[in-house]
Amino acid sequence: MVVYQLSEEATDRLFQALADSTRRDIMRRVTAGESSVSGLAALYAMSFAAVQKHVAVLERASLVTKDKRGREQIVRANHDGLRRARRLLDEYEAIWRERAGRIADLLAEPDSGKTETSKAEDGKGSS
């Protein structure tokens, strides 16, 4: 299976962005509706600058866009970026499920896991 092609750097930025619980929460909020950076900052026990940095990480990962509206910075979910992330994660999930299925098949085989010693002890091995 060929995994959806994002550059290594883009994939790293995506996973880095999603690795932090605050950024995941920001994503949840802006996916539901746009928000200003100052409105987001009011929701967290951290400085405005820290929230700005979280938004910048999400923006570099193409998960959000930021637009100026007067003096405010408005943050919106980037649905194209979210679709790319979803496609990548779906492909990784398919790979992991296939591997887990192969492991399950191996474990389900009648003699799986038996060593030559245990087969000999069972009378099935060669003497």
Image: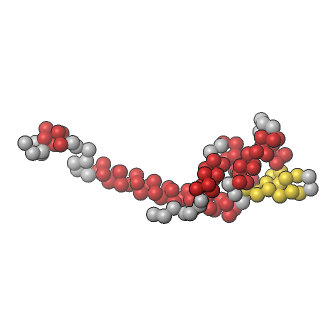
Q: Is residue 81 visible?
A: yes
Q: Tell me residue 123's x, y (percent).
A: 10, 42
Tell me how many marks there are.
Answer: 0
In the rendered structure, the answer to whether residue 99 lies left or right of residue 93 reads left
* Quadrant where the image shows the N terminus: bottom left
Q: Is residue 26 visible?
A: no
Q: Tell me residue 106's x, y (percent).
A: 30, 51
In the rendered structure, the answer to whether residue 7 lies left or right of residue 23 reads left
In the rendered view, would you say 101 is above or below 121?
Answer: below
Q: Nearer the viewer, residue 21 or 66?
A: 66
Q: Tell me residue 87's x, y (percent).
A: 57, 61
Which residue is found at the position 59% from the left and 61% from the top?
6
Image quadrant in which you'd find residue 69:
bottom right
In the rendered view, would you say 38 is above or below 82?
Answer: above
Residue farthest toward the right in the current orientation of the protein: 70
* Quadrant where the image shows the C terminus: top left
Residue farthest toward the top in the current orientation of the protein: 45
Which residue is found at the position 41% from the left and 57% from the top?
98
In the rendered structure, the answer to whether residue 95 lies left or right of residue 24 reads left
Q: Nearer the viewer, residue 13 or 18?
A: 13
Image quadrant in which you'd find residue 42:
top right
Which residue is found at the position 63% from the left and 56% from the top?
10
Which residue is found at the position 25% from the left and 48% from the top?
112
In the rendered view, would you say 4 is above or below 27?
Answer: below
Q: Tell me residue 48's x, y (percent).
A: 82, 41
